């Protein structure tokens, strides 16, 4: 492998460190570490708060970087991406508490406080974001109500926090900043007037930097701890994992939609300018920052969390041998063989956001909507995947209408691209060809931006994507003739 870079890719359920290099015009990736990312519940003020175990996460990624440096002592760069919206509060450089998990239930009061000062319609015109109750702006409002912001002089989003611990430099990467709700969607700068109206400190977050910016070098003590024999720069990438994943979508033309499929499903298009119409607000689409100033026009749809959380529930029930299985491939095969039509539920219903017994919630949703619930695990899996595919199809249809952009092809990247049943159901329900892969799209996008910043590669986003297309052959899923579709009422029709 030629000169390499290291991508630290932190997902909501696991993290990884991946080395990326270039050989004969093609990418070469090597996993050097994979580790779980498990939140912790802490008793606080009469309730259980859900937090990220950020210290353990840092320990794990540091071990991964140490291995990367042993494998590639001449490492050219390190880049960090993670999930969006969550942050740590600091005072004089010291973290005040573990960062809250976006699934923690404290944000309802934050939504009420923000909308009491800035109506939802105006907020959308300012930040262009889909309403999600855990958006950073609502979390900060909840912190303010609880008095936590009075103690803090800085907030760092998760990738920026890791970069700060590695380099000692404070910065906010722009693609992730765009998910906070505090960035002007038109200018791409902090909306200080909005912060003032919400009673939030103007300088709570550090200044913005863009993907490709050199954040700094490893601190000497950090370099020594990791075993680095030389100075290694840390480079800003599209630190929101979806921003990195979209870089790695191997689209050959301008008539493609993307689905970044993992714990969440991010479904949308890449545009040159935001869409801020009343119709876009009503459809709850978001305009987030992308690499090279592009706009990620998308909707945050529930994802494979529904499946993984269901499996976690089943594993805890002490089922019989015939029922007991956590083998995802086997479950999907059983689901593909289900002949009885399964109910399609609203995968984005807020009842499915919190951890817990997802199958029971699905059954309750079905009964409330006069639909027969699934029977058994295979039917639940089929219902989940049918519901996700139906949500994808509806979202892509809306995106096409709202943006005025024609969509012929759907690219599925990320972990969901390995789910053959989900990919085929998506092709069937959208009526469009699905191209699945690459799986490690987020890490690939992270690697590509670092390579361009360090001079290993050059060119536009399209040039970077051509490298992806040369390296990874997508799996093609044409829509099947006479496939089932979904009526607006939520019932099966053929």
Image (cartoon, grey):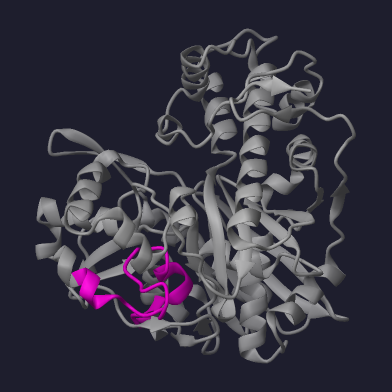
Tell me what residue is drawn at x 72 percent, y 64 percent: 249
Relative side of 371 to 141, left or right: right
Eyeballing the image, is 429 above or below 363? below
Secondary structure, magenta segment, majority class: loop
Q: Nearer the viewer, residue 412 or 392?
A: 392
Which residue is pictured at 54% across the width and 89% down the height?
A: 230
Q: Residue 443 in the image: state x and y as whole percent.
A: 64, 65
Q: Quadrant of the C terminus?
A: top right
Q: Position of residue 349 (x, y in %)?
A: 46, 33
The part of the image, by quadrant, that contains residue 456 is bottom right
x and y percentages locating residue 57 in the rendered image: 44, 56
Note whether 207 is above or below 98 in the view shown. below
Q: Position of residue 395 (x, y in %)?
A: 60, 47
Tell me which corner region of the image, top left, top right, bottom left or bottom right, holds residue 39. Answer: top left
Q: Which residue is located at x 20 percent, y 61 percent?
A: 96
In this rendering, position of residue 44 left or right of residue 399: left
Q: What's the residue at 58%, 26% (across, down)?
A: 311
Query: Is 13 or 294 nearer to us in this picture?
Result: 294
* Range of magenta residues: 167-195
Residue 171 among magenta residues: yes
Task: Look at the image and tell me in which quarter the N terminus lies.
Answer: bottom right
Asked if the magenta segment contains residue 308, the reply would be no
Q: Is residue 87 visible?
A: no
């Amino acid at each position: 492998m030629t000169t390499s870079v290291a991508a630290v890719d932190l997902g909501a359920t696991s993290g990884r460190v991946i080395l990326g290099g270039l050989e004969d015009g093609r990418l070469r990736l090597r996993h050097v570490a994979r580790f779980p990312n498990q939140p912790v519940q802490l008793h606080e003020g009469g309730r259980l708060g859900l937090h990220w175990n950020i210290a353990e996460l840092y320990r794990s990624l540091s071990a991964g970087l140490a291995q990367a440096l042993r494998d590639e002592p001449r490492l050219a760069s390190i880049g960090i991406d993670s999930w969006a919206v969550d942050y740590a509060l600091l005072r004089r450089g010291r973290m005040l508490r573990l960062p809250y998990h976006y699934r923690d239930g404290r944000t309802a009061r934050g939504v009420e406080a923000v909308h009491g000062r800035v109506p939802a319609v105006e907020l959308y015109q300012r930040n262009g974001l889909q309403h999600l109750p855990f958006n950073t702006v609502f979390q900060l409002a909840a912190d303010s109500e609880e008095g936590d912001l009075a103690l803090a002089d800085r907030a760092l989003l998760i990738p920026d926090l890791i970069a700060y611990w590695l380099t000692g430099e404070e910065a906010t990467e722009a693609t992730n900043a765009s998910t906070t709700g505090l960035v002007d969607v038109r200018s791409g700068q902090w909306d200080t007037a909005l912060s003032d109206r919400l009673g939030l400190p103007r300088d709570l977050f550090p200044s913005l930097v863009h993907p490709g910016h050199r954040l700094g070098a490893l601190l000497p003590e950090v370099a020594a701890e990791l075993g680095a024999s030389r100075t290694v720069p840390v480079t800003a990438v599209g630190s929101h994992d979806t921003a990195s994943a979209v870089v790695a979508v191997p689209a050959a033309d301008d008539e493609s939609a993307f689905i970044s499929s993992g714990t969440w499903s991010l479904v949308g298009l890449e545009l040159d300018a935001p869409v801020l119409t009343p119709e876009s607000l009503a459809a709850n689409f978001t305009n987030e920052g992308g690499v090279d100033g592009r706009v990620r026009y998308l909707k945050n749809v529930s994802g494979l969390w529904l499946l993984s959380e269901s499996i976690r529930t089943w594993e805890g029930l002490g089922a019989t041998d015939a029922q007991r299985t956590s083998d995802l491939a086997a479950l999907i095969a059983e689901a593909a063989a289900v002949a009885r039509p399964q109910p399609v539920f609203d995968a984005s219903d807020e009842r499915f956001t919190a951890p817990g017994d997802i199958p029971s919630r699905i059954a309750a949703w079905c009964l409330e909507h006069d639909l027969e619930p699934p029977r058994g695990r295979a039917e639940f899996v089929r219902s989940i995947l049918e519901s996700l595919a139906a949500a994808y199809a509806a979202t892509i249809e809306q995106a096409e209408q709202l943006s005025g952009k024609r969509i012929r092809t759907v690219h599925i990247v990320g972990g969901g691209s390995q789910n053959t049943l989900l990919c085929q159901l998506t092709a069937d329900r959208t009526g469009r060809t699905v191209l699945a892969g690459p799986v490690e799209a987020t890490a690939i996008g992270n690697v590509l931006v670092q390579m361009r910043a360090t001079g290993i590669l050059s060119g536009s986003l399209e040039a970077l994507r051509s490298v992806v297309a040369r390296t990874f052959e997508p799996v093609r899923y044409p829509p099947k003739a006479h496939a089932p579709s979904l009526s607006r009422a939520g019932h099966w029709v053929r």
